[in-house]
Amino acid sequence: MVDPNGIFMWRRIDARLTTSGQPAEAQLADIGALGVTHVLNLGLHTHEKALADEGGSLRALGMEYIHIPVDFDNPEEVDFTRFCTEMRGLSMNTVHVHCIVNLRVSAFLYRWHRDELGMPEAEAREIMERVWRPGGAWARFIGRDAAVGLPHRIAGRDY
């Protein structure tokens, strides 16, 4: 299995799960070529980097599209609950999860791995920290209250 080149913040989590920032229109076919059956987007359609009709483009390529718009400044438990419901339903599928920069996704996956799959906290955190170490509302969202007053730190830039 050869992962596509050039998709912003591309990460392979395991054989059935990949993540990234916003793929470009032409890169959707590359994702489909991996056998991905479902794409879950946590980004907002109103973002300047969002695709005009990502759902339509994915359906035309034979993939299902799920959109859970998560406000970057205010991630909510209802968002995570819906994410968990969708991920449980997709457990036997090959799934790509993205947002705009892969920050939302990595925080959601941290909690998914830790809280839903029972992965050891340090292992789940290491996967998230390949992308970032959240501060502010995202630190609160992942349950790291000591980091709430800290800024976000991005891997490769801040550490």
Image (cartoon, rainbow, N blue to C red):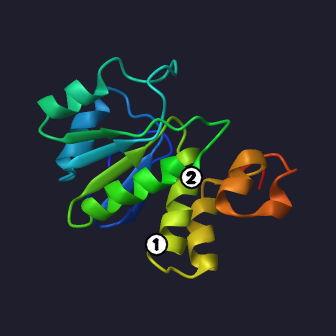
Q: Tell me which residue sits at (26%, 29%) in the image.
A: 55
Residue furthest out toward the front: 78
Crowding near the residue tagged with mark 2, few <14, some 14–19, many ≥20 C-alpha atoms within 10 Å: few
Task: Give me the residue at 19% from left, 50% from top.
Answer: 37
Query: Considering the numbered disc 1 on the image, is that residue within a helix, a strand or a loop?
Result: helix
Residue sitting at x 51%, y 45%: 9
Residue highlighted by disc 1: 116
Q: Report which quarter residue 7 is drawn in.
A: top left
In the rendered structure, the answer to whether residue 84 lies left or right of residue 122 reads left
Residues 122 and 30: in front is 122
Query: Please, is residue 131 above or below residue 74 in the view?
Result: below
Q: Which residue is mark 2?
A: 77
Label 1 crowd bin: few (<14), some (14–19), many (20+), radius 10 Å: few
Give coordinates of residue 22: x percent, y percent. 44, 34
- The N terminus lies in which quarter of the figure? bottom left
Q: Tell me which amino acid carries mark 1.
A: Glu
Residue 23: x percent and y percent?
Answer: 39, 34
**Which mark's residue is nearer the viewer, 1 or 2?**
2
Tell whether label 2 touches label 1 (CB within 8 Å).
Answer: no
- Identify residue type, mark 2: Glu
- Name the quadrant containing residue 41: top left
